[in-house]
Every structure is written in structure tokens, then in C-alpha cells.
Image (spheres, rainbow, N blue to C red):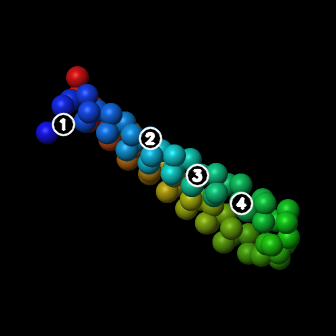
Amino acid sequence: MLNTAARNERRKLTASFINAISSGTILAALVVPFIGFGLGTVQPSANVLNIVGLSGFGVVLALMLHKVARDILKGLEE
């Protein structure tokens, strides 16, 4: 059985991991389209609505992951 301190550290580590995934997701959602245009891998004639929609989806996913990480931290014990 784990003691309280060990459970708290495990929860903090899990929340930190999920938050790091959230940060990477938001970075990919917002920065990668600009890199694609800059490198020429995304054509200027590409459907902008698709790019904006996918970026929006990435931002929403990142926010949901951040919320999950915050909820995990609510379970910390004194």
C-alpha cells in the first residue's frame, strides 16, 4: 500500500504528464500550420476553413486535457 505522500506524488506526476501533452497539442495546433505555409508543404490554395477547424479542434483538445490534469490535482490529500 502506498502512503499519502506517495499517492500525492503519483497524482502530481500524472497531472504533469497530461499537462505536457496538452502543451504539445496546443503548440502543434497553432504553430504547425504556419510552418507548413512557410515551408511550402501546405499550398496557399488549401481550404482555410479546414486548417482553422483542425487548429480549433487541437486547441479544444488541449484545453480538455488541461482540465483533466487539474481534476487529477483536486484529488491530492493532506
For residue 7, say whether it is visible.
Answer: yes
Q: Residue at 62% x, 66% y: name it.
A: 53
Of the image marks 3 and 1, the number of the one nearer the N terminus: 1
Q: Judging from the image, what secondary structure is the residue with disc 1 in?
A: loop
Q: Judging from the image, what secondary structure is the residue with disc 2 in?
A: helix
Q: Which residue is mark 3?
A: 24
Q: Are marks 1 and 4 in contact (CB under 8 Å)?
A: no
- Residue mark closest to the camera, 3 vs 1: 1
Q: Amino acid at mark 1?
A: Leu
Q: Which residue is mark 4?
A: 32
Q: Judging from the image, what secondary structure is the residue with disc 4 in?
A: helix
Of the image marks 4 and 3, the number of the one nearer the N terminus: 3
Of the image marks 2 and 1, the number of the one nearer the N terminus: 1
Compared with residue 21, is residue 46 higher up or lower down, i.e. above or below? below
Q: Quadrant of residue 29?
A: bottom right
Q: Residue furthest top?
A: 78
In the image, 8 versus 75, the foreground residue is: 8
**Residue 2 image label:** 1
Q: Which residue is mark 2?
A: 16
Q: Residue at 44% x, 41% y: name it.
A: 16
Q: Residue at 64% x, 51% y: name it.
A: 27
Compared with residue 39, is residue 27 higher up or lower down, i.e. above or below? above
